[in-house]
Image: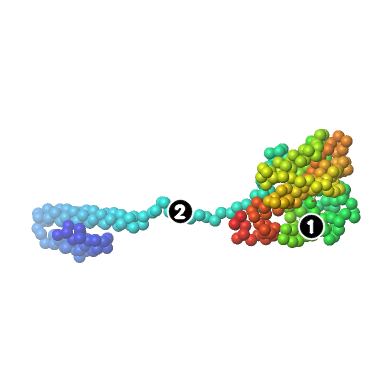
Amino acid sequence: MAHEAIVRAESAQALTEVRAGFLGRKGSVSGLLRGLGDLDPADRAERGQQVNALKQRIEDRVAARRSDLENARQASALSSRQLDVTLPGAAPPQGHLHPLSLVERDMREFFAGLGFSVEEGPDVETEYHNFEALRIEDDHPARDMQDSFFVEGGHVLRTHTSPVQIRAMTGRKPPFRFIAPGRTYRVDHGATKSPMFHQIEGFIVDDHTTFADLKGVLHAFARHLVGDDVRLRFRAHFFPFTEPSAEMDFSWRDGWLEWGGCGMIHPGVLENCGIDSRKYQGFAFGMGVDRTAMLRFGLPNIHMLFDGDLRRLEQV
Ligand code: PHE
């Protein structure tokens, strides 16, 4: 009878109640034990053993049923909470480098392959490094308040990366080859002009450097940036710190894009850095970096690079 009641209990709660019905303080088996006092001592011991054995059997069956119920509960919980391991995982948001950082790193890598190392200079530059040592005369337009951001105390926000030439060459003995990427500043604004922009400077000094070497390096660089069939165009130009000087363009779609300036380092600049210009020559070039990033990522406006709009940068 107890066995059937136990097997019929469908939950842990029901099982607890069934057990109490037999073994609880007021349960029927407990009642049997209480009745023992009325028996004569000879029978009492034997009867007591029988009731205790019964008690134990009921306990065992209750325990067995309890564990069956628990196993069934777990099995049904498992089957109702199945895990589909083929579902795509939740992708955590992932950042990436700014387009300008990507382009600049790529340029650094390219020039590292040609044996150039990286040199840096300050954004707030002395007028000596930015102008004088580069032979830029007092009446040059770049020295006008209209074109350059002057800071107190003979300083200026560097208008180009060329002052890094002076810093890198002074006190060093050729041969050497450097690039100097960085921020530059001019009083200028428009769809393709920003008062802060980026240039990369490159220069070599050695005892047999020629304009042909300069063209070779620039051509390799242009091919790296634009593609193997790119063409370069050099236009005679004037810079106070190079002689001869040229501006260069590269072919783009049906026309030409202005790229930057270049030339053979002026002997006077070498001398300003303590380098014997009868023994050594060098070439230098400098070009904008932002335009390259705009071309590569198809940005119509330079300010997209600088306004920090994440929605836009994430599309890049
Ligand atoms: N510094 C020049 C400019 O900003 C570019 C240049 C660099 C020209 C090196 C010649 C040699 O316009």
Q: Amino acid at mark 1?
A: Arg
Q: Give the mark, 2 or 1, whose residue is nearer the N terminus.
A: 2
Of residues 24 and 128, the one nearer the viewer is 128
Q: CA distance from mark 2 to mark 1?
A: 50 Å
Q: Residue at x 41, y 51 (%)?
A: 85
| Left or right side of 185 for 13 | left
Q: Which mark is residue 239?
A: none
Q: Is mark 1 within 8 Å of ligand 1?
A: no
Of residues 185 and 51, the one nearer the viewer is 185
Instruction: Determine whether label 2 and label 1 are within 8 Å by CB.
Output: no
Q: Which residue is mark 1?
A: 186
Query: In the rendering, at what x and y percent does residue 201 appear?
Result: 76, 46
Can residue 172 be seen from the camera position used here? no
Q: Residues within 10 Å of mark 1 (few under 14, many from 20)?
A: some
Task: Farthest residue to the bottom: give it.
Answer: 26
Q: Residues within 10 Å of mark 2 (few under 14, many from 20)?
A: few
- Is disc 1 placed on a helix, strand or loop? loop
| Left or right side of 288 for 153 | right
- Is disc 2 placed on a helix, strand or loop? loop
Query: In the rendering, at what x and y percent does residue 38 appear?
Result: 11, 62
On-image quarter of the N terminus: bottom left
Can residue 160 be seen from the camera position used here? yes
Of residues 28 and 287, the one nearer the viewer is 287
Q: Residue at x 67, y 61 (%)?
A: 307
Q: Which residue is mark 2?
A: 88
| Left or right side of 71 for 21 | left
Query: In the rendering, at what x and y percent does residue 149 appear?
Result: 81, 58
